[in-house]
Amino acid sequence: MSESPSNSAAPDGRTHGEQLHGHEKQTTAALTLGALGVVFGDIGTSPLYALRETVLATGGAVPKPFAIYGSLSLIFWSILIVVSVKYVLLIMRADNDGEGGVLALAALAHRSPGIGRKAKNAIGFAALIGLALFFGDGVLTPAISVLSAVEGLAIGSRSFEPLVLPLTIGILLGLFAWQSHGTARIGRIFGPIMVVWFLVLGLMGLISILHVPKILAALSPHYAVALFIDEPWTAFTGLGAVVLAVTGCEALYGDMGHFGRRPIRLAWFGVVLPSLLLNYFGQGAALLLEPNKADIAFYSIAPDWLHFPLVVLATMAGVIASQAVISGVYSVTRQAVQLGRLPRMEIRHTSMTEYGQIYVPRINAMMCIGVILIVLIFKSSGALASAYGIAVTGVMLIDTFNASIVASRLWKWGRWALIAFGLLALVDIGFFAANSLKIPEGGWLPILIATAVFIVMETWRIGRRAHIERIRTESMPLPLFLERADKTPQRVAGTAVFLAARSDVVPGALLHNLKHNKVLHERVILAHVSVEDTPIVPRDSRIAVEKLGKGFFRINIHHGFFETPDVPKSLEEARPFGLALDVETTTFFIGHETLVPAENPALGRWRTWVYTHLVESALSPAKFYHLPPGRVVELGTQVSI
C-alpha cells in the first residue's frame, strides 16, 4: 500500500496503481473528472471559511485594506508553495508502487539506501505520529465542511438559524449510515458536481474581481512580507487561519494510486487552482468595497438570487469532501491493520470493481460519534476553525521529512534535497507553530484524538512484539519437532492447515491438537502470512512453498499493505509449486489465545491491560483471513504476558 526508482520517475506520469485499479482503459479526461470528485473535496470547500478566518485574524471584524491585501497574499503564496510546488510537483514524484500517503511515503523512505537504524526508527516513529494526526484531522473535516456550508442558510435568513445544527447533524448521520452501501453509485456524480462547484467558484470570483481589479495587486509577495514587518505577531497568528486554505494536501498525495499523477496534476492546474484563486481574490475584492462583511466573505460575492442554490451546492460539496476524508480514513486503517499497527478489524469490500471501495464498520461508528459530538460542542464553523489546522500541519511536516530522505537517498539529489525540503520545512514549522497557539481554543481536540490513537497503535506494536517473542520462547523449534514427527501415534487422511505467527516454531494449535487428539493429518501445512512494506505484491511473488518432508509443508504468504489477505485463495495458488489443495476438504486450525498477566508484565501494568483488551476486541483470524467457516477448528490456550 515492489516499487523501484523507475516507478517513481515514470516519464508519462502513469503509475502501476492506475493499471491495478482497472483504469488503464479509461481516458485521462475520465480520470481527471474522477479526481475532481474525490481528491479535491477538502481543499475545494476551503473558500467557505479560509479567507474569512484569515481576514478576521489579521484585521478584526472590520478589516482595513492592508489586512485584506496581506491575507490574500499569504493565502496565494501558501497555496503556490505548499500545494503546487511541494505536493503536486515534488512529493507526488515519491510514489510507492504508484501509491501515496503518509504510510506509503514512510515505507519508501524506510527502504531508501544508506539509511541507518536510528534514521529508520525515526521514520517509523514519525509515521505513527502522522497516522495518528490523520485520524484527528479525519474527524474534524466532515464537521467543518458540512457545518460551514449549512450555515449559509442563516446568512440568507436569520429565521433558518435554529435549523443549522439539526440539519448538519442529520446530513452527517445520513452520510455515515450510507457507508455500508458503498459509494459506487453516488460516486459517479461526484465529479460532475465538483466541476459545477469549481466553475461557480471561479465565475463568482471573476465577476467580483472585474468590479475591483486592483485586488490583483495582492499577487505580489510584498503585501505578505509587509504584513509581517508592520504587524509581525498579527501576521504570525494569522498563519493559523491561512493553513485552512491548504488543507487537503494529504488527500492529493494519498489518492494518487487511484488516479495517477498526471490526472491529478491536470485537475489541479487546469481547474482547481484557477477556480480557488479567482474565488479568494473575488472575496478580497468584495471586502475592499464592504469590509464589514468579513464574517460572510464567501457569500458576499454571490448575487441574492443565487444564495440558496449556492447553499445547496456548497452542502453537496461539503458532503463530497467529507466522503473523501472518510474513505481516506478507511484506507489508512486498512494499511495500519495490515502493517500490524492496529488490531484486526472487519474490512468489507463494497464494490467488485473499484479498488478503494471499502467499509470498516468499527471505524465508521467511532467517526460518526466523534463528528456529531464535535458539531454539538463547537456549534459553528468559526469555532471549529480554532481546532482545525494543528493535525494538518503536523502531517505536512512529517511528509516533508520523509520526502527529503527519499529525494536525497533514492533520487540522489544530495545537498539540493536538503536545501529544497529544508526551506519547505521552515514553511511547515511556521504553520505548525502558529496553529499551536490555537491549542487552548480547540486545537487540543485533534491532539487528544491523535494521542489516543498513538497510544493504541504503539501499545499494539509493542504488545505484539512481546507476544510473539513469548510464543517463540514457549514453542518448540520446528526442526526439533520434525525430527520427532515419526513418533506420532497415528496419521489420519486429509490436509490440515495451521496458521503460524512465526515460521520458525511449531504453531501452538498443532501442539495442542497432538496433545489432545494424538493424531496428525497426512499433509500438514504451516502457513505464515507476512506483510511487505510495498502496497502490492506481484502475483508471482505472493507465495513461497517449502517441502519439509514427512508430509509437512511450509508456506509463506506475502501481500502488500494495500491488500486484503485471503489465505484460502493464496493456498489455491500453490498448485504450480507442487502442492494441490482442495479448500473445501481442508481443515484449518487456529489458536485462540487467552492472555493472562505475568508476575512482572513485559509491558507494564497499564499497557498490559490496554493490550489485553485490544486482543480481545480484535477480529477473529478465521474471519480476517477469510477461512471457510465450516472448515475451521479453534484450539484454546493461555499465554502469560
Image (tube, rainbow, N blue to C red):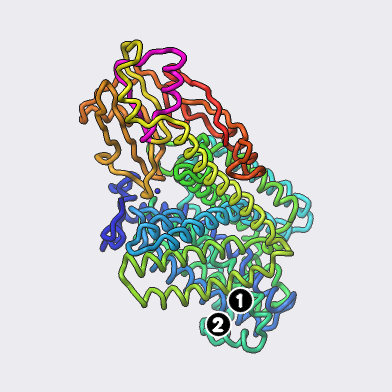
Q: Work out whether 88 lies above or below 593.
A: below
**Residue 195 in view of the camera:** no
| Lower position in the chain sequence, tag 1 or tag 2 | 2
Place residue 223 in its image quadrant: bottom right
| Residue that badge 1 annotates | 284
| Drawn side of residue 261 relative to residue 246, left or right | left
Place residue 605 in its image quadrant: top right
The kind of residue on which mark 2 rests is: Ala
| Drawn side of residue 144 relative to residue 341, left or right | right
Residue shown at the point (49%, 67%) measured from the top left: 275
Residue 261 rendering spot, x and y as whole percentages? 36, 59
Q: Work out whether 233 lies above or below 344.
A: below
The answer for how far apart the CA atoms under marks 1 and 2 are is 9 Å
The kind of residue on which mark 1 rests is: Gly
Q: Are marks 1 and 2 in contact (CB under 8 Å)?
A: yes
| Drawn side of residue 628 relative to residue 616, left or right | left
Tell me if mark 2 has few (under 14), some (14-19) or many (20+) residues whose alpha carbon lies within 10 angstroms of its own: many
Give the mark toward the camera: 1 or 2. 2
Q: Mark on residue 218?
A: 2
The kind of secondary structure element at disc 1 is: helix
- From the image, which quarter does the C terminus lie in? top right
Q: Is residue 508 magenta?
A: yes
Residue 368 rendering spot, x and y as whole percentages? 64, 43
Residue shown at the point (45%, 54%) measured from the top left: 103
Q: Is residue 469 magenta?
A: no
Residue 64 rendering spot, x and y as whole percentages? 69, 83
Q: Nearer the viewer, residue 306 or 86?
A: 86
Q: Work out whether 162 lies above or below 290.
A: above
Magenta segment, which residues? 503-528
